Amino acid sequence: MLEQLADQQTKGKEIADIRALLKDHNEQFKHQVLVQQFDTDDRVTYRFLRARKFDLPATADLFKKAVALREEKQLDTLLQRPCPLGLEYKVVSKHGWHGFDKHGRPVYLKNTGLQHFPTLNGVGTVEQRLAYNLYITEYLSQVIMPQANERVGHKIKIDQVTTIVNLKEFGFHCIKQHNYTWCQGISVANNILYPETAGTTVLINAPRVFTMVWNIVRKWLDPVTVAKVQILSGDGAKELKSLLGEECYNSLPKEIGGTCECMPASEVPKHAMGCMLGHPQSVAFMEHLRKRNDEAGIPNVYSPPKEVDDDKEVPLNMEGLSVEEQEAAKASPKDSPKASPKAASPKEATK
C-alpha cells in the first residue's frame, strides 16, 4: 500500500513538473485540443512522459514537435475535410477496426500478407498514403476512442489499441514491392503525434521470411513499442482468445478463426477484398469519407456517380486499380427502379 501511494505521488509530481515546464508554450497553443488534453487529462500527459522514459526535457521536446505538426497539418479540423484517397485506399489496403477486446480497447486488424502491393502502391503517391494514415489515426482518436470509453462507462481510461496483423501469404514479393519510405514515414508520424497509443500488437501466420522484414522495421520503432509485439505460431488461436477474450475472438472474421462474415471474398472484386467492409465500424468510417468527398464534389470510387442532365456518367479515378476493381467502380444501381444519386452502401458498392 505504501509503495502504491509513493508511485502515485511520484507520478503526480512528474505530471505537475512537465506541465509547469510547458506552461508558456501551451498558453500560446491553448486552442489546440491536444494541448487542452495535456493540461487537464493525466493519462494524455503520462503517455508523453512514458514515451520519453520520464525525461522532462525530452518529453517537452516531443510534445512541442507534436503540437507543431498538428498545427502544420491542422489536425483538429482534419475530419471536417475530404480525404480523396480514402475510399480507394480503404478497399485495397485490407484493414479496419473489428470491435473491442476484453479490456475495452479497440481492435484493429490488418491483412498485410493478403495485400496486392502493385495495386496498393498504385493508389496515390507516398505523400497521399501518409496523409491517409493521419486521417484514419485521427479518426481513431476523435471517434473510435470516445466510443471505447463510452462502452466502459468512463470507469477506466481507454487510450490504447490492440492490433492484429495477419501475415498469411506474406512472402518475398511483399518485401520487394513494399514501400519502406512509406512505412518509415508512418512510424515517425505516429511516434510523434500518437505516442504510447499502441497497445499489444499480435502477428499471426508469420512465415520465416517475415523475420528478415521485422529486423529492418523494428529499427524504426520505439523500443517500448517493439516490446509490445508478439509473434504467434500459426493462427495463434489459443493466445488470441486469451488476449482478446472469447467473445471478441469469436467475432473476428472467419478467415482468422472467428465467426464473422463481414469480408466475404465472393462479394468483392479480386485484390479489393478490403477488410471488414461490412463491419459497423468500417461502414461508419467509409460513410464519413463519402460524406466529406461529396461535400467537396469529389467522385467516390466504389460509389455510383451522381446523376447529370445529359445522363453521362461522371468519370471515376481508376489509376492503380485492377480490371476487376475498375468494373466494380463502374457498376451503378441505376437500372434498379429504386436507384438514387445517393452513395451506395459499402456492400452494394463493392458488388
Image (spheres, rainbow, N blue to C red):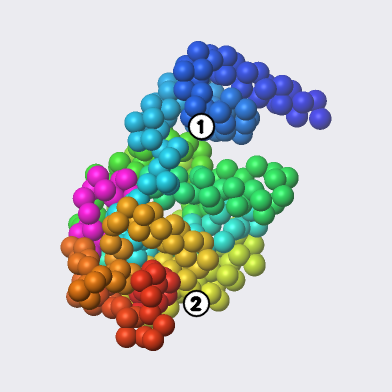
Q: CA distance from mark 1 to mark 2?
A: 37 Å
Residue 17: x percent and y percent? 59, 16
From the viewer's perspective, is 303 left or right of 191? left
Residue 110 placement, left or right of 145 = left
Secondary structure found at label 2: loop
Against 70, is 186 above or below? below
> Which disc, if any, is residue 261?
2
Residue in the picture at 39% in, 86% down: 337
Rate crowding at label 2 as few (under 14), some (14 to 19) or many (20 or more) other CA atoms within 10 Å: some
Front-lying residue, 116 or 332? 332
Name the amino acid type tagged 2.
Answer: Glu
> Dot 1 lies on which element?
helix
Question: Residue, x 38% and y 75% (percent of image)?
Answer: 340
Residue drawn at 55 percent across, 45 percent down: 160
Of labels 1 and 2, the one closer to you: 1
The quarter of the picture where the C terminus appears is bottom left
The answer to if 114 sits in the magenta stretch is: no
Q: Which residues are magenta?
A: 118-132
Residue drawn at the location 20% of the way across and 67% of the way down = 315
